[in-house]
Image: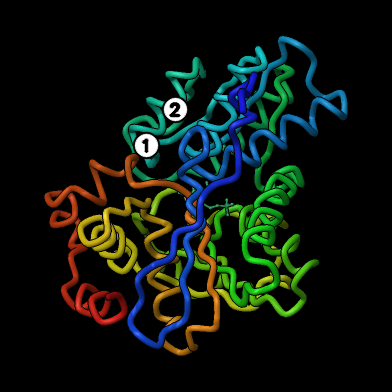
Amino acid sequence: MIKNRVSELIGQTPLLRLAVADGAGTVLLKMEQYNPTGTAKIRMARTMVDEAEAAGLLAPGGWLVESTSGNTGLGLALISAERGYKFTAVVDNHSSADKLRGMLAYGAEMLNIAGDDEALATAERDAVAERLAAEQGAYWTAQHVNQGNPNGYRPLARELHDDLGDEIHYLLGAVGTGGSLCGTGRALRERIPELRIIGVEPVGSIAFGGAGAPYHQSGTGSPEGSEIGDLVDYDLIDEGIKASDSEAFETCRYLARNFGVLIGGSAGGVVYKALELAQSVGPETTIVVLVCDGGEKYLDTVFNDDWMAANGLFDAQVVDRLASMLR
Ligand SMILES: Cc1ncc(COP(=O)(O)O)c(C=O)c1O
């Protein structure tokens, strides 16, 4: 089938079964890295723009602005290039360099508000995006509160149901804005009322309680001081759990080396938690993991031995556990 626009290539991503230990639950990875831009977030970027166009908020030649740690920005950069909008990404130094380079490749304008500071600056970024919109007439997509964000994942839920029917017992995903897990989960639960939805955030992220602390899983979680938007729907999420950076990154590295499966850091944490859950259920139980992006964007960090060592992230116990949970 021939497509006419690159956004028509979004979706229909594959499902990959993990080789879990005998007797464990079935773990299926929804491989969202097979979307344009290599991430699930292109789904919500397209929908936020579609909805803004339909509401008359974006006119031809219009200007979009978003505060982004990378993957949302990549999506908005691509859609803007496709549809002739100007896009300004407000970023800090926490984003992966490859995501920033990707946005530039699609012709985005980059506004780094962090100077030399390495820390995540979500609140400051949001304030700058809001000001650009208010003072200069750009349209701020405001991903933390925009319903187009969760709405963008309805097709993902449909794909899962088309492929698996009602036989999905658990849905696990990383929680940043909450758009991907809650958007997918809400739409899927309309079809499967008993579905259990489990959110995973980094240790140090504050959406599911606990003390705030710095973490290295990029693009996900809610750092201390950030506001948790309404899109994180606590009524929908049955359980919120935490993955450490070591659990997340050792999982990425283990899957790459033992199975040739290259996933991003946040997905590594979700997969680790899914494998733990799989130990306590039988093979007839199906656990679907939303893999937000691929590992290609993290070759300088998660897959770099020096970076892992410098940040004290190697953990042999996690590797042993992985070896016991996977074949
Ligand atoms: C790598 C990665 N993981 C997880 C998330 C969290 O997704 P959501 O904002 O839909 O909760 C994001 C969001 O940008 C991301 O880029």
Q: Give the residue pinned by disc 1.
A: 93
Q: Quadrant of residue 315?
A: bottom left
Query: Of 98 and 155, which appears nearest the observer?
Result: 155
Q: Return the x and y of residue 73 as percentages of the image width and height.
A: 53, 32
Q: Residue at x 40, y 33 (%)?
A: 99
Is residue 204 visible to the viewer in this orientation of the structure? no
**In the rendered image, the vertical position of residue 53 relative to residue 287, given as above or below:** above
Marked residue nearer the N-terminal end (1 or 2)? 1
Q: Residues within 10 Å of mark 2 (few under 14, many from 20)?
A: some
What residue is at 70 percent from the left and 44 percent from the top? 152
Disc 1 secondary structure class: loop
Q: Is residue 117 above or below residue 196?
A: above
Drawn side of residue 222 relative to residue 93, left or right? right
User: Does residue 144 appear left or right of residue 209 in this picture?
Assistant: right
Percent of width and height locating residue 234 = 69, 70
- Disc 2 Cβ-to-ligand 1 distance below 8 Å: no
Element under label 2? strand
101 shown above or below 327: above
Asked if labels 2 and 1 touch by Cβ distance under 8 angstroms, the answer is yes
Q: In the rendered view of the protein, which quadrant contains the N terminus? A: top right
Tell me what residue is drawn at x 36 percent, y 58 percent.
215
- Find residue 116 and report its image quarter: top left
Residue 242: x, y in percent?
45, 72
Residue occupying the point 80% across, 67% down: 190
